Image (cartoon, rainbow, N blue to C red):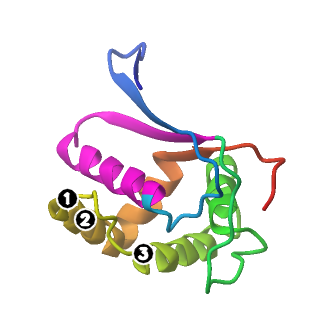
């Protein structure tokens, strides 16, 4: 979905939403999650002068990343949600570093074009880009009551 809102100053805000119906749990390293993030990075790269926001909505349960500890007591996707709701949290730098480690360990999904993957990896290596993107552009919506 692509929703365009107009600001009083004449600018536009675009909310790009991807909806995923899944029967199993979702982690940040899940293929669908990596595809969504990488495609969003590519979209940002090609629309530098636009005010974009990304929303991934799913019915999936939040899973726990294998081989990664909790981030400040949160599963990785819960930590991501925490950044969206409390970007000024004293834990935000630690969470962003942890999310970066999780993303860096991900493998390229087979359906993701190699050029999109390269853009994603380049974005991931940019410390300021990652911090700004998480605080300004991303939000994950899922049922917060359900747990794995």
Dot 1 lies on which element? loop
- What is the x, y in percent for residue 53? 44, 38
The disc label shown at residue 106, or none: 3
Circle nearer the N terminus (2, 3):
3
Residue at the spot of label 1: 113
Q: Which residues are magenta?
A: 32-58
Q: Is residue 9 left or right of residue 81?
A: left
- Asked if residue 50 can be seen in this view, the reply is yes
Q: Residue at x 52, y 53 (%)?
A: 135
Give left or right: position of 108 versus 1.
left
Residue at screen point 65% across, 48% down: 60
Q: Are marks 2 and 3 in contact (CB under 8 Å)?
A: no
Outermost residue on the front side: it is 23
Find residue 28 and report its horizontal and vertical position in percent. Answer: 54, 64
Q: Measuring from the top left, give residue 101's x and y in whole percent.
A: 49, 80
As helix, strand or loop, the secondary structure at mark 3 comes to: loop
Q: Earlier in the sequence, mark 3 or mark 1?
A: 3
Q: What is the spatial separation of the Cα atoms under label 3 and label 1, in whole angstroms? A: 15 Å
Using the image, determine if residue 4 lies above or below residue 107. Answer: above
Q: Residue furthest right?
A: 145
Q: In the rendered structure, find residue 117 and report the number of the disc placed on it.
A: 2
Secondary structure at numbered mark 2: helix
Q: Which residue is more in the foreground, 94 or 102?
A: 102
| The quadrant where residue 122 appears | bottom left
Q: Give the Cα separation between the discs numbered 1 and 2.
A: 6 Å
């Amino acid at each position: 979905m692509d929703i365009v809102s107009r600001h009083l100053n004449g600018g536009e805000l675009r909310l790009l939403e991807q909806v995923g119906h899944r029967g199993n749990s979702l982690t940040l390293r899940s293929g669908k999650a990596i595809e969504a993030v990488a495609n969003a990075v590519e979209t940002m790269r090609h629309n530098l002068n636009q005010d974009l926001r990304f929303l991934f909505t799913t019915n999936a349960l939040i899973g726990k990343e294998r081989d990664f500890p909790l981030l400040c007591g949160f599963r990785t996707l819960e930590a991501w949600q925490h950044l969206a709701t409390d970007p000024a949290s004293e834990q935000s730098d630690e969470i962003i570093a942890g999310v970066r480690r999780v993303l860096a360990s991900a493998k390229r999904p087979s359906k993701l074009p190699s050029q999109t993957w390269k853009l994603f990896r380049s974005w991931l290596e940019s410390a300021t880009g990652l911090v700004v993107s998480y605080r300004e552009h991303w939000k994950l919506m899922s049922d917060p009551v359900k747990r794995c």
